[in-house]
Image (cartoon, rainbow, N blue to C red):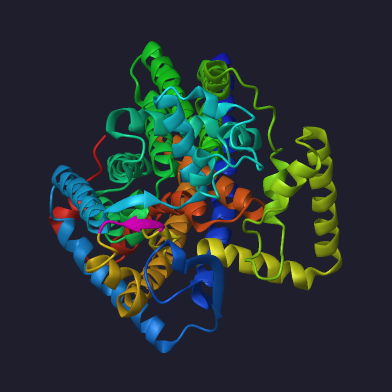
Amino acid sequence: MPDESRHKAKGICAAISRWLLTVALGLQAAIVALLLVLSLIFTCVFKRGNSVGAANITERVDYHFRAPSFTFIGGCILLFMVLMCIIYGIAQIKQRRTLVFLLAFVMITQILWIAALELTSYGYPDSQSLIDGADALINGDLPRYSPAFCQSRTQSELCMARPHAVPSPHAYFSYYPFQTGPMLWYVFAGSIFGSHNIIAFQILNAFAITGLVAALWRLGTLIGLDDAGHAALATLLATCVPLLMFATFVYPNAVGFSITVAGVALIAQAFRAQHAWQCVLALVGGFLVCGIGVILKSTFIILMLAAIIGIALVVIANRKWWQGVAAIASFGGAYMLTKLPVRIIEHITHQDFGNGMPMLSWITLGLNEREGTTPGWWTGIPLRTFHETHGNYAQQSQVAKEFIRERMQHFAQDPGDAVHFFSEKLASEWAEPTFMTSLYSQYGSSAHGFTGLPQWILSGTGAARLTSYENIAQTVLYAFALAGVIAMLISGVRSAARPMEDATIFARTFLCAAFLGGFLCYLFWEAKGIYTLPFYLLLFPLAAYGVQTIMCCVPRSPRLRSKKAPA
């Protein structure tokens, strides 16, 4: 009887875990369907000048809202057919060879693009401030961190030579104390290659993105991709232009995301370990790696939370409660790790940056709409509030709460305006085909003035053609991802007779929860396509699963049909 009771309890727990994952996948399917519709009826393009360079770009969006044209639909069908042919061919190659070729292709393509741009400086304001702060630490110029350094009335030659958009390090980190974490990456890169070596920083990004591709490959294996699925994943990643241009953004987004996903892949291995100590070691190591990634980009805490959700569903299914305890302890340690950079920098510089702006300030940005700006995008409201309250954290929070309450009341009273606001905001984040990578590829000065290939790709006819391709590819990706999520949902329901492995439950739950977390975060948070790009990339293993499902519905060669995903 005790054995029968335990078996029954285990079955109930497995059913609960499966039901929770099914609900999450259903929600993800609805959201991906929404993004597919947005990509069909919107094509967002940034307003810009006629030439290439930082002086000709803006973050103001033109919304091309209309029913998809016959040309667009034809392009989607053509791309679908071409991709399926390529995938069928690649599926005949051994997975290991495909992965090696994919990694080499991604790395080489990024290096060639970085070399073609040959940026000597970078104009993104946050990048400039972080480079400035890192340069002061590398050169031991700690007086630069003084609150009195280059105040508004200072007329010294040194201060007059500083870019107008770059506040003093103390002022900048008083606004954003959490940015001390990303600055450590600039310190690391600058100590080796020089503080202002833009190309070196981009090459480090390229290595990180190549590692990201390997991590996504591993997660794809865990969710159940076979040879056709891996061939699809390789093809989709290799033809994703935003991924290949991501490295040019001189900011730790790419590195932080890559490190965090690598940590998640390590956590997934915990559920394939043969011994308890190996499982615990993988959990601890994985979360510590995730913590390093979150230091470089704080919003990737979403990925850590998604990992915890994945572990929770695994533990509910297998009833190995000690795994949950180890995971929570590891998460706590990793979270504490993310709080160290600001303390370290304050100790080194002998300064106190205070609490900065409350997180509610970014929701204020995300709900803001002003004439001449894109809904939910950056404006100077939080900075103005910071100065008006003299940096008082409680007063800033109160101002933000009042603004958020007023906006939500307005949306409740005028649902039509709410639909208009959020549809335009979501379109600017998820239906802008480049995810801002073309914009940030030219956000600086080029050694040769963006002549040659960069000029053709970033302006005029070449830019229009590339954007058209990216627009079609984005829609096709959403369609594949929707098919993949639905197929995964169905397979999860059918798994009652044959329960999934723990690692598979974790990987599927993580990809679902992380995407949902990113979508919900940037539904209300400050909008930027470059911020949503990482969560868009999490759809690729699911899209590959969708292609795999489609190919299962058509006749395949005996050799291809017999191959299975490796353990």
Residue 8 visible to the viewer: yes
Q: Which residues are magenta?
A: 443-447
Q: Is residue 489 visible?
A: no
Task: Please state, as top left, top right, bottom left or bottom right, where the N terminus lies in the image.
Answer: top right
Foreground of the two, 516 or 344: 344
> Residue at the spot x=86%, y=66% of the render?
413
Kindly report the secondary structure that dominates the magenta region of the rendered protein: strand
On-image quarter of the C terminus: top left
Q: Which quadrant of the view contains residue 340?
A: top right
In the displayed structure, 237 sits above or below 287; it is below
Identify whether 78 is placed above or below 283.
Answer: below
Q: Is residue 234 magenta-colored? A: no
Percent position of residue 92, x then y: 13, 55
- The verdict on residue 445 being magenta is yes
Q: Quadrant of residue 13?
A: top right
Q: Residue furthest front?
A: 156
